[in-house]
Amino acid sequence: MRLARLGELSLIEWVRGRVSYKDKKNLIAGIGDDAAAFRPPRGKIILLTADTMAEGVHFSLDWTAPYQLGWKLVSINVSDIYAMGGGPLWAAFELTAPKDTEEKFIKRLFEGILDALRLYGASLVGGNVSDTKGGLVLSMSVVGQVMGRKGRPVMRKGAKTGEGVYVTGPLGDSACGLKLLKMINRPVEIEKNKKINRPLEWEIMRPLLQRHLMPVLKRPPRNAGASISAMIDISDGLFLDLTRLCKESGVGVKIYEYKIPISREMKKAAEDLGLDPLALAGGGGEDYELLYTAPKATAPRGGILIGEVIKKGRYLAGKNGKTREMRPTGYTHFGSEGKT
Amino acid sequence: MRLARLGELSLIEWVRGRVSYKDKKNLIAGIGDDAAAFRPPRGKIILLTADTMAEGVHFSLDWTAPYQLGWKLVSINVSDIYAMGGGPLWAAFELTAPKDTEEKFIKRLFEGILDALRLYGASLVGGNVSDTKGGLVLSMSVVGQVMGRKGRPVMRKGAKTGEGVYVTGPLGDSACGLKLLKMINRPVEIEKNKKINRPLEWEIMRPLLQRHLMPVLKRPPRNAGASISAMIDISDGLFLDLTRLCKESGVGVKIYEYKIPISREMKKAAEDLGLDPLALAGGGGEDYELLYTAPKATAPRGGILIGEVIKKGRYLAGKNGKTREMRPTGYTHFGSEGKT
């Protein structure tokens, strides 16, 4: 059945029946009213973020399954909440879809959204469905809270000279996964563990495809507001997002390029495909790892040190001791490449 | 200059420079970070709503100026907050626009957003800009609070048999304004008071066009949670939204059709254009007036009584005492006309 026959209201009823509310005692009105109503967490700072995925720009239906789209939409929003040192609570989803979209497509999309929200401990409480004459546009807004008793949010500003620069995991996997998907050129249902062995072996491809299609986020370090001076999530590429953090903080940075973490699978895939792992890791984007600065002595455990905060300028240092300027080569919309 | 040359980051910087924050002491991070951060209003219930306007579905650029789009996007979101008996605080805006959109178009759009938010006492704190290969898609999410000391939100459920049914102002103006715009078929800059006198006189047309292009909302009655049993905003048409309220409340309704308020200008315009005023008022939609139920003895002042809550069924009563079934004829997406 197509959406035109299913109808807006039946779709909303269907979703309403499937939502499980995480923190039900504090939710006063959920899906189906004019707005969602909830009690704010006592004494905690509230976070609000919103992000959009547009067909043909952020994703292609040629190689993306609807469940994956829903999952990723949640993850990219939660990533912004995590990047403030917070956790997600409530989400609103705005679906804009062509009238002839298949009902089962939309339902799988919602299942991806609901499963990912459950994973991150959040609930869908509202939103909007609307038709369009263009392609699919998916927007989500998420309300979260800052963690910790007297938690303060961690912003992009706050980095200080002498501190270390850390990331939470290997970079470039997602960009490498996207390269693979463009070669495969059809949806790979990793959520159902459907294996394929071309162009590379499944064991190499699976983690890379997963990182691009259905990223699973790491939580920010505990009590981030106390130990971390500045933080951002890597969505547009390490070098570009690092540049943003530096500009907000009014500092510079020196990155040891050989310390940038690269996964075994990405290294192998890049080799086989003739790609430069460092270019993927530095400018590929959509990593959804956290990038933060902290005093080296008290930095939270688990972060991977990749460089240090300096007074000004942004440099990449090689193993040979040579240093060159870092060029922010990540993705920005409307084609202003690397401009920050 | 087109967006492709201006760039995402310069646009964000431009907006950032123009935002005036309403409740600055409680805002910890605004535009330019991963998420907005703010202190929640003490002891008050928080509201979250999100709404979308898509080109070709919700608006046509043939007869809408960008400033008006921005204004309306804010109004339709605030309307949902008002319909819960609340007031808006913080907003996030998700812009999805083609790369070749003119810079001045986007800036006027933002000006409409910022001016309308200022009018309603709210501030823009975040969002997202993205390009698209389809038409313009505008999404907004608004966080608000329930008014009053121990305020409770007013939901769609709660209407009780014997109560009165009220609306806050004349209906059908917006639908009539849309009919006029389709005839005019070019933007009318009512925000600059640029008059035109065709097809009807400016004095007749101005309020109708205003209601469609740049609705100015009425606040919900004071202490709505104490005096009103159920409420909804009229966005898809009186009969359809009334049906929603009835279904959520598990009640019926009898509406005196001669009591449905119709403005002098709409009546005159409908006459000249050969339209049925009652059809416009009952099913036209986009009125953004509030529709609520309350005990007649204690109903807030200023509401217009149009009927009463009955046990079941939904009826329209004429002056002659005759009664017929009400058919919900408002707008739903994906073509499920009137299905609730």
Image (spheres, coloured by chain):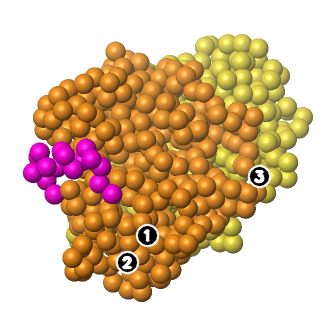
Chain colours: A orange, B yellow
Labelled pair 2, 1 in contact (Cβ < 8 Å): yes
Residue A53 sits in quarter? top left
Circles 2 and 3, Cβ within 8 Å, touching? The answer is no
The disc at residue A253 is 2
Is B340 part of what is drawn in magenta? no
Query: What residue is at 60 percent from the left and 32 percent from the top?
Result: A31
Direction from residue B38 to residue A256 in the image, left or right: left
Question: How crowded is the residue under tag 2: few (<14 C-alpha within 10 Å), some, or many (20+)?
Answer: many
Label 3: element kind: loop
Tell me which numbered mark, 3 or 1, is placed earlier along the sequence: 3
Give the residues in magenta.
A261-276
Foreground of the two, A281 or B149: A281
Which dot, 2 or 3, sits closer to the camera?
2
Element under disc 2: strand
Is residue A152 something that shows in the picture?
Answer: yes
Q: Which residue is mark 1?
A: A165
Whether residue B33 is visible, yes or no, is: no
Q: What is the spatial separation of the Cα atoms under label 2 and label 1, in whole angstroms? A: 8 Å
- Which callout, 2 or 1, points at the residue further toward the start of the chain? 1
In 3D space, how far apart are the residues under numbered discs 2 and 3 (Cα atoms)?
38 Å
- Above or below: residue A147 compared with residue B267: below
Q: Return the residue at label 3.
A: A42
Question: Going 67% across and 23% down the picture, which residue do you hit?
Answer: B248
> Which subunit holds the residue at mark 1?
A
Q: Quadrant of residue B104?
A: bottom left
Of helix, strand and loop, which mostly describes the magenta segment?
helix
Mark 1 residue type: Val
